[in-house]
């Protein structure tokens, strides 16, 4: 009987370790997106719009990966059919990028305690990055 209990505990520990490892991958993707977003802000400050477009694409890619990991690891489906608060209200590029940074802030820290909120923040940040890309492309015409 004792061997069965140990095997059960080992199985639970293995599952917890696997989830922790997946959470670390998710946190790494969010942290990379934050780092890239900081670099994007520098490019915006320097008015280097050509490089900014590629940097925003990289931010979006990291955020998509993070939201995928959150969804798979925590059984979250894409419950965000419409992010209406991300719609264009005539805001400028700098505002949208700052809002992205604000939305993404602390998302990695709440993955364990509230993965659904972390998922929401990552998906909203992704939508904001896409909005920033749209604004950037319109200004580069």
Image: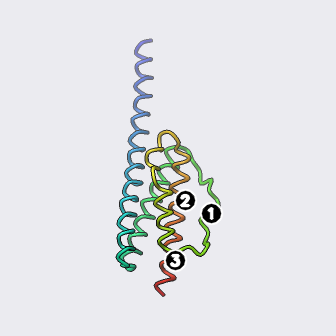
Label 1 with label 2: CB-CB less than 8 Å: yes
Residue under label 1: 85
Res. 124 mark:
2
Tell me where residue 87 appears, x and y as whole percent. Answer: 61, 69
Tell me where residue 122 appears, x and y as whole percent. Answer: 50, 55
Chain-order first, disc 1 or disc 2:
1
Asked which quadrant contains residue 2, the reply is: top left
Q: Classify 10 Å Cα crowding around label 1: few (below 14), some (14-19), many (20 and above).
A: few
Disc 2 versus disc 3: distance between alpha carbons? Answer: 17 Å
Residue under label 3: 135
Q: Is mark 1 on a helix, strand or loop?
A: helix
Taking depth in this image into account, of 64 and 10 the one nearest to the observer is 64
Asked which quadrant contains residue 53, the reply is: bottom left
16 to 68, vertically: above or below: above
Taking depth in this image into account, of 116 and 37 the one nearest to the observer is 37
Q: Is mark 2 on a helix, strand or loop?
A: helix
- Determine whether, in the image, residue 74 is placed left or right of residue 14: right
114 to 29, vertically: above or below: above
Q: Residue shown at 38%/45% (left/top)?
A: 24
Q: Classify 10 Å Cα crowding around label 3: few (below 14), some (14-19), many (20 and above).
A: some
Q: Residue shown at 50%/39% (left/top)?
A: 113
Q: Residue shown at 39%/35% (left/top)?
A: 17
Tell me where residue 41 appears, x and y as whole percent. Answer: 39, 68
Tell me where residue 109 appears, x and y as whole percent. Answer: 44, 45
Q: What element carries label 3?
A: helix
């Amino acid at each position: 009987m004792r061997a069965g209990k140990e095997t059960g505990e080992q199985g639970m520990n293995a599952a917890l370790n696997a989830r922790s490892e997946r959470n670390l991958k998710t946190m790494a993707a969010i942290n990379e997106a934050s780092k890239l977003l900081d670099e994007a802000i520098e490019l915006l400050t320097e008015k280097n719009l050509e490089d900014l477009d590629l940097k925003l694409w990289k931010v979006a890619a990291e955020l998509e990966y993070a939201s995928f990991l959150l969804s798979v690891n925590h059984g979250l489906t894409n419950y965000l059919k419409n992010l209406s608060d991300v719609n264009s209200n005539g805001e400028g590029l700098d505002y949208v990028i700052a809002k992205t940074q604000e939305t993404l802030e602390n998302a990695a820290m709440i993955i364990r305690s509230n993965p659904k909120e972390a998922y929401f923040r990552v998906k909203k940040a992704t939508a904001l990055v896409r909005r920033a890309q749209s604004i950037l492309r319109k200004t580069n015409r």
